Image: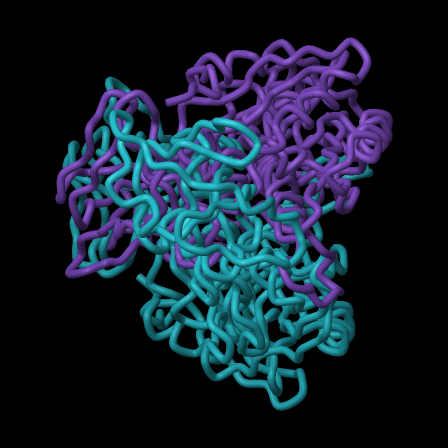
Chain colours: A purple, B cyan
Amino acid sequence: MKEFFKVTDLEQVLAYASDFPRVGTEEILLEKAAGRVLAENIVSNVDLPDFVRATMDGYAVKASSTFGSTEGNPGYLSIKGAVEMGESPLFSIAPGEAANIATGGMLPHGADSVVMIEHTEAIDDATIEVYKSVAPGQNVLEKGEDVRQGETILACGRKLRSQETGLLAALGKEAISVYRRPVIAVISTGDEIVPVNEIPGPGQIRDINTYTLANLVRAAGGVPLPLGIVRDNFNDLLETCTKALAQSDMMLISGGSSVGTRDFTIEVLAALPDAGILVHGISISPGKPTILARSRNQALWGLPGHVVSAMVVFEIVVRPFIEHIAGLSAQHKKVVKPSAMLSRNLSSAQGRIDYVRVRLVEKEGVLWAEPILGKSGLIRTMVQADGLIEININSEGLDKGTEVEVLLL
Amino acid sequence: MKEFFKVTDLEQVLAYASDFPRVGTEEILLEKAAGRVLAENIVSNVDLPDFVRATMDGYAVKASSTFGSTEGNPGYLSIKGAVEMGESPLFSIAPGEAANIATGGMLPHGADSVVMIEHTEAIDDATIEVYKSVAPGQNVLEKGEDVRQGETILACGRKLRSQETGLLAALGKEAISVYRRPVIAVISTGDEIVPVNEIPGPGQIRDINTYTLANLVRAAGGVPLPLGIVRDNFNDLLETCTKALAQSDMMLISGGSSVGTRDFTIEVLAALPDAGILVHGISISPGKPTILARSRNQALWGLPGHVVSAMVVFEIVVRPFIEHIAGLSAQHKKVVKPSAMLSRNLSSAQGRIDYVRVRLVEKEGVLWAEPILGKSGLIRTMVQADGLIEININSEGLDKGTEVEVLLL
């Protein structure tokens, strides 16, 4: 039997990611910040809140004025005034005094807590009964309780979710520095591939990988640059790759990396400026015939043509490279994988990591992972799948009922 | 103690969602389809693949010609020709014959399987040795094996991921019918709120909720329509709400739903055309003082002003309404929640569902959910949180070590 690939372990392939530089940065408006990766440390130049705020509707008081108050033995406080929202109260609170205040209002000088309106009763315009005591600091946010001035509150390399945009708004950051979204060229190769708007002739099929890969690039935080279908022709592919190099930060070529055409794709990749082939073959299945090359600062991928293989390689191998050049820091790459029970026995060859498509089904409160077996050319199996499970490189398989972690697709 | 809210159970609130109509549909190009919700059933008008395809590089053969072949006792086949990619072979394969074929190539008439190139050796230009037998159908995709002509392969109401766009490409669907993205008006209220580009005066804070809610709307598949900050003034709010009704499919008003201002927000909502207040108060914490109203076909929400409460109510209550009007069908709303071990005891009041912010930390292979306690006015707690856990309405709390499901944020 011939040995075509000298395969590289997955871990070793992933270790190459850090050799590639991160993309540049840009200044964007906060409105556009969600999903982007921060390229600066955010240091607060204010205390949040900047004043003592009520967190309940009620009365601002000195807590000591309420000590001992109960429903049976209420305390009596005289109303000093009412706090206007968004304004600094012009009066202060002495022992035995209270000021009407709404949630978010600024506590008057002298007050240190808020009695909830539910725990009071107005006797007349000037006096309230208090049925419950409060402790100092109760029902208020202290100055700086949320964020302290001078504190580094968000670190460079963090992906911004909704709540982070809210925090940036609170700090008055109208514009922030983020990493550019990396531009990822997507090329399909093969004489049998026709565009989606053509009717395939005998022996032809429509281009699937441009769509799946472009959308995976988007989901990974990149901007896909689809460059269409290239015939199995050295000069055509070299020309397209040269164009891709100039316009993108990384390149994905699908098809052309299996035995039949590999020399050809390899030759083109090797002909690019300062090119080197880093990996030819990875010890994973599907996805073994994957090529990783480098030209100057760019990673160039030869992905398998089979749609399932190309998607699996993207999720397992390519995505970490995109996230790295996109500036995402290691501690913010937290991927939480739900656990499920494997619904049947699975066998596996040792010496490679197997990725098995699974459907998640809940039965009587238990989440089951049902393997979807099928050839890696069948797009349908990915449409049916909710995720992937991994069978370890040293494992001969997994038994039914094993708890597995599911990488959601 | 006064009772301000007659609270509604969460389940009952969520049941109102189905009373609201779905948004209209639109035709879009496949390039733009990822993340959208399908508004038609997709029926395949072709077999996929449309011909028998090789899934390996090697030789197309009649399987019976290889029976009994081993490394010790190879079979000999004569080479009939080579299959050109993307073309229909002009020859057929008889017993004892083979044709060179690459992955994706069309099998010649008479061939029913492919011997992998690794299991062959070319003796000369006309003959190969075969070291391993193949079964009929091995290393090929049969016609229609992926998708059969006439089959409904994607159902209306399904959200399209990368793989679904790939399937649509394979079927030649250049354009598809999807639900419009619902437009969700976002309004912040409060005299103390200033825009992000202003320096807050004494007693003022910057608008956070417009950012958090707009980005949550986007994540839920909607298009946010931020209408800015409205003062606590009946006419101003009525004017903005009237404008919002005309331009959106749903409305979120944050602030103004707690005791202090609730009559005022309620009055405005009640003054809108054909308006009715459906819910005032939900038995969840945080988020109890939430209002759900209806004007004609639109859901109008009065959300709490506290940033954490507004976000929790959005994720738990508002998001299902948005997904419903966005056309997402119930069976495609699968949310998979990872499990974790609770890191400490948590107490809870009966009679309401508590949502607790948690940070996920992996220690020695175990995923722990560490509660982040803190007032619901603190945006920092959401920035620290990876998700929410739920404490049941009838529970007095959860013990350390309990397995909890985490709704990721």
Which image quadrant for residue B227? Answer: bottom right
Name the residue rendered at 22%, 51% in the picture.
A368
Name the quadrant of the N terminus of chain B.
bottom left
Residue A28 is left or right of residue A77, and the answer is right
Q: Is residue B364 visible?
A: yes
Q: How many numbered dots are placed on residues in this image?
A: 0
Of residue B230 and residue B356, the one placed in the foreground of this image is: B356
When the figure is inspected, residue A186 is found, relative to residue A378, above or below; the finding is above
Residue B9 placement (x, y as % from top left): 32, 69
Residue A248 lies in quadrant: top right
Instruction: Answer left or right for A289 relative to A293.
Output: left
Asked where in the image residue A233 lies, by quadrant, the reply is top right
Residue at horizontal 13 percent and vertical 44 percent from the top:
A400
Q: Nearer the viewer, residue A222 or A66?
A: A222
Q: Tell me which residue sits at (65%, 69%) in the image.
A: B182
Residue B334, percent across and down? 38, 59
At 48% across and 45% down in the image, what residue appears?
B98
In this rendered view, identify the residue nearer to me: B54 or A27: B54
- Residue A8 at what x, y percent from top left? 46, 15
Visible residue check, residue A98: no
Q: Is residue B80 above or below residue A92?
A: below
Residue A285 position, x and y percent, is 39, 33
